[in-house]
Amino acid sequence: MYMDINDIIKPENLVYTKPRLMNDNPMHYCPGCSHGVVHKLIAEVIDEMGIEEETIGIAPVGCAVFAYNYIDIDWIEAAHGRAPAIATAVKRLNPKKMVFTYQGDGDLAAIGTAETIHACNRGENIVIIFINNGIYGMTGGQMAPTTLEGMKTSTCPYGRNVALNGYPLRIAELVERVDGTCYVTRQSVHTPASIRKAKKAIRHAFENAMAGKGTSMIEIVSTCNSGWKMTPVKANQWMEENMFAKYPMGDLKNV
């Protein structure tokens, strides 16, 4: 006799369930990757706000490119770094839509720096979700603008040298300074408590965009254990001990 799961688990006893907007495609991300957690948070927020029919995501090149494969909303693929420009066009043509970008640091902080800064400066009513793991994850672990000083990558095998490569780029601090941003925050998803804070930040940013308050950016400091050549547990520890010092958690701007 077939029995539905709802017949077994009473609503008051349900601790967690799969987000309704997450489909059944197996995730391709490496074990321990932060992308899957952030995907689930986005799906939960969109579902809870009841805006799945009004939401459009923009994902460019990199590990972020496959977000459309997991969250059942409308998606547009963008050229490398150009997601904020595409999001600008979509939002201006469809002002009642909830438009967000989903980008990695190699995309947003390198080839996409101009699009990011100017979209924020114009105060476009979009949300930028920025996954910062300090490395080019998909293409071979090369140094990114956010790579820490002394951090080893495939293109700086002896560690990032400031005299040669410059300083790590702190994008959140840059966009916090421009007038068009209304909410800039830096979060992580490595513990249950941090996941709850990140979800709250995403919800707040989406509400800002729908209210026409300007640009919101959520930076998620993340791990890339494959690129870092670490286990998932070790990568989380390394992130706490090293990444958080350069990229501290919390709100930078909340207008």
Image (spheres, rainbow, N blue to C red):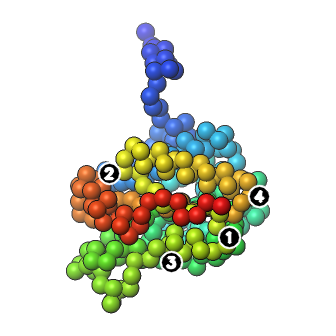
- Name the residue beneath numbered marker 3: 111
The image quarter in which residue 93 lies: bottom right
Name the quarter where the C terminus is drawn. Answer: bottom right
Q: Secondary structure at mark 2?
A: loop
- The residue lying at 57 percent from left, 72 percent from top is 175
Q: CA distance from mark 3 to mark 2?
A: 26 Å
- Residue 155 spot, x, y in % from top left: 30, 79
Q: CA distance from mark 4 to mark 3?
A: 27 Å
- Residue 179 spot, x, y in % from top left: 67, 72
Three-letter amino acid code at disc 1? Gly
Circle 3 residues within 10 Å: few <14, some 14–19, many ≥20 = some
Furthest toward the top, the residue is: 1
Q: Secondary structure at mark 4?
A: loop
Q: CA distance from mark 3 to mark 1?
A: 21 Å
- The residue lying at 58 percent from left, 70 percent from top is 176
Which of the pair 75/254 is nearer the observer? 254
Marks 3/1 in contact by CB < 8 Å: the verdict is: no
Three-letter amino acid code at disc 4? Pro
- The reply to whether residue 36 is in sight is no
Q: Is residue 203 above or below residue 182?
A: above
Mark sitting earlier along the chain (2/1): 2
Mark sitting earlier along the chain (3/2): 2
- Residue 36 spot, x, y in % from top left: 43, 49
Q: CA distance from mark 4 to mark 2?
A: 37 Å
Mark sitting earlier along the chain (4/3): 4
Mark sitting earlier along the chain (4/2): 2
Q: Which mark is residue 180?
A: 1
- Name the residue beneath numbered marker 2: 32
